[in-house]
Amino acid sequence: MNRLGIESPRGLVAFAALTGCLVTTAVAALTDAGGLFVAAGLAGCGCELLLHRTEPGLMSRLGRLHMGATSRFEFRCVLLLLLLGRLHVTGPVGLAAAMTLVLCLQAGQALHAALTTLIRRRRRLAVAARNIDLRRLDISDRPPRRLTEWPGQRMLVYELSALLGLAASLATGDARWVVAALALAAGACLITVVALVPYLVRTVRRLPGTAQVLAEVNAWLVRRRPRTVLYFSGPRDRAHQVTQWLGAVAALPTPSLVILRERELLAALEPTPLPVLCVPSAAHLAQLDLSGVRVALYPANTGWNIHLLRVPTMQHVFLAPGDDDRAAAVDPYSKVYDQVWVAGEAGRRRHVQAAVGVEDADIVEIGRPQLDGLRVAGTGGHAPVPEIPTVLYAPAGDEPGAPGEPIVRALLDSERPVRVVYRPHPPTGRRSPEARAAHRRIVALIHAANERRAADLIGDVGDVGEAGNVGEADDIGEDSENAEALRTEAARRRAELAKRIAALDARLRRADADEAMLTRDHAAPDAALLTEAEALRRQWHQAHWAASPPWLHQVIEGDAPTLHSCFDQADLLIGDLCGVVGDFLATLKPYALTTPAGLTEEEFRRQNPLARAAYLLGPGASGMDDVLRPLFDPSLDELRTARHEVKEFLLGPATPPSTQRFTDAVDALAEKGETIVRLRDLHPAPPPGAGHWSVTR
């Protein structure tokens, strides 16, 4: 189903029904079955409407395969004319009128598509922005969405009108009904086309040109004088690489700026108080006045980084990826930067040992600012042992042979009960059908375990009552009812918060506005709105965990609850050798890794620093009892000291906080950049050709 872009079994059924309706419509047109044609057409309209609303991925995929809404509409119009010609219900004059109206309708649709495409392209500014005051550009409003969007739904309305007219003509034998219905559809299409013309004229006359936009952006840059730039280029699904640094950059005491290169990243970027510029063209980027910028931060190594790297007045910094022991965390391209910032000593050694041209003096350890807000396990004494500890299983891979099922089965069958929170990597199953099937089996195992636990809980209360301890059974029942009432209230609160968060997101993202309007209207960050949204998200997470009983296993799919929220709930993490485990290390809670096939435990620990403080699972999740034992008796946690040592090695010391170390590194590099610029101004480079006189003399 994923290859078609279908996301649910209901979508698959609707797609199959739509295909059947199209085939039935063709057969009905060829066999002069007017009633069947109308019935199949109406059913097809219903399937189309359902798919437009529930399976947008499928609709987009069909469009790329040249089987989109317009092609299907034109195909059914041809079948309608074929049926009218074979039935002779309209006569020659009526058939000619119907053909003319259908041609007018299709021409109107083509003209409408051309106008909307022209308006959309003309409304694309050279530079798009957020949280930057560009109101003096006098950008006009876009056309209403009902005029430019949902073309498939509009064509369904036209088709529905034609089908109803055909049904009336078949019932009465009067061709005027179908001709009138087609005239109504063509007239409605003409009205939408005429309504778009004023917006096209307004766009051509009033929308500012490239020179005007760049001049206004440069005027803002001169006034603002940002000292630090966070620069990113990449596909939409990599937006998290820049998003994870927004908080640290926003906390800098000096003005900062975010520069993106792809327009799609603007929609994917999380709401932020930072000013954001999207500059798709390298030529336009070269025309921006970035003379005040002293530090440029790059979260990813991409080819388009060269467009900013060539600016000599900046100090360029590569923000190395997570410290998860992967060789891919070192890239020979890193030597083009002035400095490479890593989390801890492990990152420094990794770059030096790789010998890719990065000098040790150019490596700065800044910690991981993203982890400063994590809840850290107590360092003094033993933490209280929960009645049912929580084990977070968060695999990061999408490999068919991943040991997910044995791990989950071993956790669910543990002699001492634990709560399992299963949070697979979001892309799990998209590339591998085997991994997708394994994921579904894990989910089924967890749901079955929850049903067994619920039945056991009810049975325990009944056993107490049968034993004659009626008062105790009543107390247990009353406690259960009180707890259930609290969870019900938490679930209600969670649903209410979700609605409020969605409303706030709609206000922040403005789905009714296009890129030009958002550039005009986002003159400054709405601090109150951002604060409210953050507070609501915290409350939603609290309500989410409170809405489930402490013994209930959970499957977390999607982005909420966040991974860090799951970290706060977990008493133990089981994962892969990846950045997820590296981040969890900041909590100082125990974690477990699976030993790869072909490696002994000693060799695995020797090769991977992250494994030196990990409890290890063998093939088939063997050794699970040893992994879970410290959860019930913290005195058996033999790796507590090792976790402290590995954490400092991988993520740096606990003090000062990473955010402060990041800020200090930016300040120090900015001062260095300022000194270099002053020296360059005092001793400008000689003009081309100067100095050659001594050789030729």
Image (cartoon, rainbow, N blue to C red):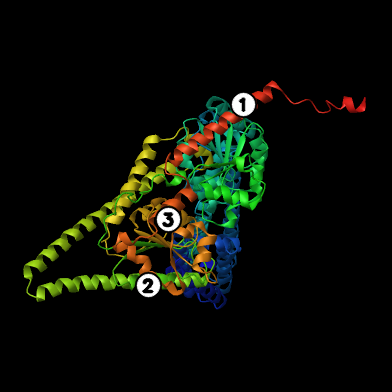
Eyeballing the image, is 336 above or below 562? above
Nearest to N terminus: mark 2 or mark 1: 2
Pick out the residue farthest to the right: 697
Residue matched to label 1? 675
Position of residue 333 measured from the top left corner of the image (x, y, whole percent): 66, 48
Position of residue 509 measured from the top left corner of the image (x, y, whole percent): 45, 44
Nearest to N terminus: mark 2 or mark 3: 2
Nearest to N terminus: mark 3 or mark 1: 3
Q: Secondary structure at mark 2?
A: helix
Pick out the residue farthest to the bottom: 31
**As rendered, which of 632 and 40 lies closer to the eye?**
632
Position of residue 474 measured from the top left corner of the image (x, y, whole percent): 9, 66
Across the whole image, how many numbered discs are drawn on residues?
3
Residue matched to label 3? 642
Query: Do tag 2 and tag 1 residues touch (Cβ < 8 Å)?
Result: no
Residue matched to label 2? 410
